[in-house]
Amino acid sequence: MSASAAAPGLDPVDRRLLKATQAGLPLVPRPYHALADRLGLAPQEVMDRCERLLARGVLRRIAAVPNHYALGYHANGMTVWDVDDARIDALGERVGALPFVSHCYLRPRVPPAWPYNLFAMVHAETRMEVVERAEEIAGLLGDAARARDILFSTKILKKTGMRLGAE
Amino acid sequence: MDEIDRVLVNRLQAGIPVAERPFAGVAGELGIPEAEVCGRLQRLLDEGTLTRFGPMIDAAALGGAFTLAAMSVPPHDFDRVAAIVNARAEVAHNYRREHAYNMWFVVATERPEAIRAVLAEIETESGYRVLDLPKRREYFVGLRLEATR
């Protein structure tokens, strides 16, 4: 893949803008103006570029990222399932639609070390609630699920979001 | 956290607009000055209630890639390996989990082929195998966590 295909339209100024903001947006009433000052750009150009990056999906949003422990979500369970390949897509969509599932992905199995292909993240105040919600998922999957587990997180070791490397 | 903090945390997970004064809307709703919104956000970051406030980059839209990686690390060696993994700029999150696979981290790179190189370097430096579990399909992503107390 060529460099231009790898990063379509991310020009050097976009790159500088993203690198300047990835640790955080300046917390002042006019943050885009503060960025513009720091980067030596016009405020309107900073805002136009941010709009374009949002429109292209390079930025999902400009937002607050909470620490789920601090919000009282002490139990974070990654529920994992070995689901029949013939039925995984229809069932994955249904599991993803459950209101308490925050992320739901299909991933490869790596036998024999890792037999699970469906991942559904469940957050709750207590582990018992996570276990109860996993039972709901199990009910939905029925006999399509051959094996299952729940991996509870015990510590956030790092949470910075994606950073751009030097280029 | 007071009621105003809760509103800020809940509202601002959805994002702020790109505008000359992006905090004006939420400040107006809450009846507080924009500078107070900013001061409260800074305090929520300092206290650890928020882990970040800013743009959220999607590696896939950059033509890059994400993977979820897992390692099985003996407890006596856990901190050393966590330091090796966390030192990589490509590692966006890392969680300790209760399982034989006890370290789970997300690797994001701008070039898809760079994922394998990052994982190989982590294997060499740490001395442990890395399980590479790239996303094949996304059924859902996006719950926002509500601050209720």
Image (cartoon, coloured by chain):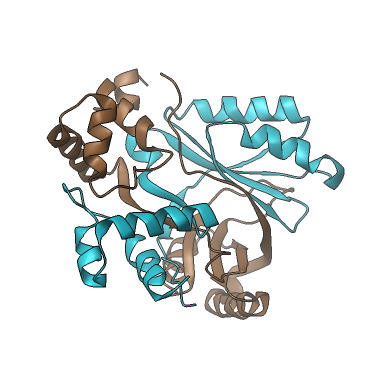
Q: Quadrant of residue B107?
A: top right
Judge left or right: residue A26 versus residue B72: left
Residue A104 placement, left or right of B86: left
In this rendered view, identify the residue nearer to me: A60 or A145: A60
Please provide percent x and percent y for residue A94.
43, 71
Whether residue A40 is visible here, answered yes or no, is yes
Q: What residue occupies the far right of the structure in this picture?
A: B76
- B108 relative to A155, above or below: above
Please state if B30 lies on the left or on the right of B127 as rendered: left
Residue nearest the viewer, comparing A104 with B97? B97
Counting the numbered discs, the total is 0
Identify which residue, A79 or B97, lies in the foreground.
Answer: B97
Q: Is residue A11 visible?
A: no
Could you say where residue A104 lies in the image, as x and y percent from the top left?
48, 60
Q: Position of residue B50 (x, y in %)?
A: 47, 56
**Residue at the spot 61% in from the left edge and 79% down from the top edge:** A129
Look at chain B in the picture and name its colour: cyan
Which chain does brown denote in the image? A
Q: Which residue is drawn at 55% across and 69% down?
A: A123
Give percent across and percent down for residue B57.
37, 41
Residue B36 position (above or below residue B122): below
Residue at 35 percent across and 65 percent down: it is B8
Q: Where on the picture, by quarter, is residue B126? A: top right
